[in-house]
Image (tube, rainbow, N blue to C red):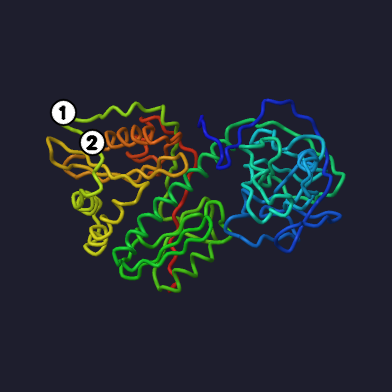
Amino acid sequence: MIDAADGAGHRPYDAPMSDGRVLQVNVSDGGVPKRPVDGARITRLGVEGDRQRALTVHGGPHRAVSLLGVEAIRRVGAEGHPIAPGTTGENLTTEGFDVSALPIGTRLSIGSECVLELSSSVTPCRTIRHSFRDLRFGRLNVTAHPADSRMYARVIREGTVRPGDAIRLTPPTDDRAERWLAAAQLDGAERASNLSLWRSAVAADVPVQIVDDGELLIAAAPTLPGPVFNQGFGFANLPHLADRAVAHFARHRVTGWLWAEEHPWPGARVEATAAYLAGPVELADGTPEGPAGLGVRELGRTEIGAWSDLVARASGLSAAIGAAFAALEPHLAREAHHHRFVAELDGRPVGVASLHTHRGVGWLRAASVDSRHRDRGVHRALIGARIAAARRLGCDLVGASANEAGTSARNLERAGLRTVAVRRRYRIDPAA
């Protein structure tokens, strides 16, 4: 459905599956090496007795367990590197198959209880550099060495695993893992887009307080109530860290919102539901739709005013937030990866939108269309023009979020995008 690789460029082999076993179970109090233990219980959030120091870039339900095959360790070691089971931080050292050669979505039934599902490759970082004689930890990068990568897995069924436990492999039966990988790419692009917007506001002396930590991004703006500048992102993958958003909103005494796939705490109330849609850029030809005389073009870096004015009017923003957009636009216009577009009917602006490119993904931010010109194809024209621009800029994937089952979602589907995830917005009122 979605022709997308994960953030580390993993492409599954077309290789027969052979069962294997657990060679070693490894844990640590943070960092590497992880030390062997006689066994450990694996839960939804990871291996009991194991910790990560960088909680915002490791862990969470989609990265609960890391695995590496001893076959890869032996190949790397044969090159003279001081690598051994556990030194690069894998929780499970496997034997009998190359774990990174398996397709994403492969299930591993371990022993009599635990079932894991491969979710992505692990991007190597400098923490593991001492396992390599030249400190070049990129030796485990899946793009350069696809058979020698560590892999992440989510937990399908909790249970205890021990060295010697048999591992039975089951190939993927649907595209769930594929859709999750595409959604993870959209999350990164959405995060980058919001960070550009909020940093542009700060550059314009708009009082926005930003937490930029790993995959988490949170903003609070006491003088600008509402979701635009008081939101948290990254909690779809790290729902167990929702307290960080609560703390940031409480510190600045604002009502805030966060996006997640599941309730961040019992009784949390859903305020909105959004579909995250993605598709290869080749699906749309970029041909503008709409009435005669309609054209869409990218605004130049010095063309300031029309974009923020129409965003404020068409989106019904408050006077304070509209003024913030007017102040931040000159700074946003200079952001290298952010592109603003205007739809003009007979030379008059009737709609605006923007595109943010990030690591091969073109993120389509919400479009704003003048109320007098809605339902005339302006929104579809803005979608097509931005997809065409993303293709010219070298993107492989385009994505957007929209109210589930709304007009925007239908227009995105008409352009060739398909839903890969559904996210829910939760309101956080620290004062309550």
Closest to the observer, 32 or 138:
138
Would you say the residues marked 2 and 1 are in contact, meaning their CB atoms lie under 8 Å apart? Answer: no
The residue to which callout 1 is attached is 292
The kind of secondary structure element at disc 2 is strand
Q: Residue at x 70, y 48 (%)?
A: 66
- Residue at mark 2 to residue at mark 1: CA–CA distance: 12 Å
Q: Residue at x 75, y 34 (%)?
A: 169
* Quadrant of the frame with the C terminus: bottom left
Query: Image check: 361 left or right of 36?
Result: left
**How many numbered discs sit on the rendered protein?**
2
What's the residue type where badge 1 is placed? Answer: Ala
Q: Residue at x 61, y 48 (%)?
A: 62
Where residue 204 appears, as percent x and y from the top left, is: 29, 63
What's the residue type where badge 2 is placed? Answer: Val
Of tags 2 and 1, which is closer to the observer?
Answer: 2
2 in relation to 127, above or below:
above
Where residue 78 appears, as percent x and y from the top left, is: 80, 40
323 in relation to 403, above or below:
below
Where residue 232 appears, as percent x and y from the top left, is: 45, 59
The kind of secondary structure element at disc 1 is loop
The circle drawn on residue 296 is 2
Where residue 109 appears, as percent x and y from the top left, is: 76, 40
Closest to the observer, 271 or 51:
51
Q: Residue at x 36, y 33 (%)?
A: 392
Based on the displayed image, in which of its 4 quarters is residue 79 positioned? top right
The circle drawn on residue 99 is none
